[in-house]
Image (cartoon, rainbow, N blue to C red):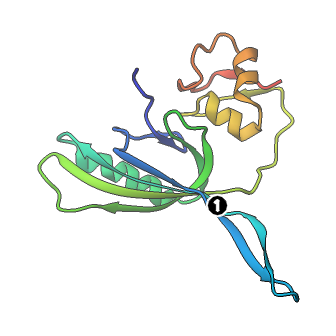
């Protein structure tokens, strides 16, 4: 099975990362009571951190890195789509070259931070896909379950294909 490339804000990685780490934490506070016992208070989930390492290879590996660096410099929030994982809304927090560059190979490290604030949902029935968007991106953007989008749009054979300019039914 061929995995779809990792994407952020519609920009595809040329090669999927070798390693991806998801850090999921909660804020937990231990409180003491007057009778000498303590209890735990769950303060809620923290924003997930998605990090990893990879290699860009080929005679254009520096150009590949420049595309990622340009995406990093854009700033702002967007949908991060990783193969086999439900997309998340995130910020590109860090991008680093790892180790010494080798001929036609560049190792890198990245960090994304999940954004948990909810975006205001549009009340539209149809949506025209922007460049680089797939059904997963649209599902996340409009808070419509992916199963619903697939059912409403039978002409789209796979939810991970790029839909540039196609009109998608939302409800």
Task: Indicate the quadrant where residue 45 lies.
Answer: bottom right
Look at the picture and state if 42 lies above or below 101: below
Would residue 82 appear left or right of 44 to someone viewing this image? left
154, above or below 16, in the image: above
- Between 19 and 141, the one lying in front of the other is 19
Residue 101 image position (x, y, % from top left): 17, 57
Where residue 78 appears, x then y in whole percent? Answer: 60, 49
Quarter of the image where the C terminus is located? top right
Quarter containing the N terminus: top left
Q: Callout 1: 10 Å neighbours few (<14), some, many (20+)?
A: some
Q: How many marks?
A: 1
Picture residue at 58% right of the left edge, 33% below the top: 133
Q: Secondary structure at mark 1?
A: loop
* Residue receiving disc 1: 47
Q: Which residue is found at the position 34% from the left and 44% from the top?
A: 18
Residue occupying the point 64% across, 21% down: 166
Toward the viewer: 40 or 143? 40
Q: Residue drawn at (43%, 48%), measured in percent from left and top?
A: 20
Q: Position of residue 159 (x, y in %)?
A: 60, 23
Q: In the figure, is residue 161 to the left or right of 171?
A: left
Q: Nearer the viewer, residue 98 or 125?
A: 98
């Amino acid at each position: 099975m061929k995995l779809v490339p990792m994407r952020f804000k519609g920009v595809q990685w040329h090669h999927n990362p070798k390693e991806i780490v998801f850090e999921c934490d909660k804020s937990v506070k231990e409180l003491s009571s007057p009778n000498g016992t303590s209890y735990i208070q769950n303060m809620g989930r923290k924003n997930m951190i998605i990090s990893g390492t990879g290699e860009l290879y080929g005679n254009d590996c520096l150009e590949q890195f420049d595309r990622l660096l340009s995406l990093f410099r854009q700033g702002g929030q967007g949908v991060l789509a990783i193969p086999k994982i439900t997309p998340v809304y995130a910020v590109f927090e860090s991008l680093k070259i790892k180790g010494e560059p080798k001929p036609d190979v560049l190792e890198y490290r990245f960090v994304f931070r999940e954004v948990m604030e909810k975006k205001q949902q549009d009340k539209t029935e149809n949506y025209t896909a922007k460049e680089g968007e797939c059904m997963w991106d649209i599902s996340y953007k409009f808070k419509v379950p992916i199963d619903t989008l697939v059912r409403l749009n039978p002409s789209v054979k796979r939810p991970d294909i790029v839909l540039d300019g196609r009109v998608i039914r939302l409800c």
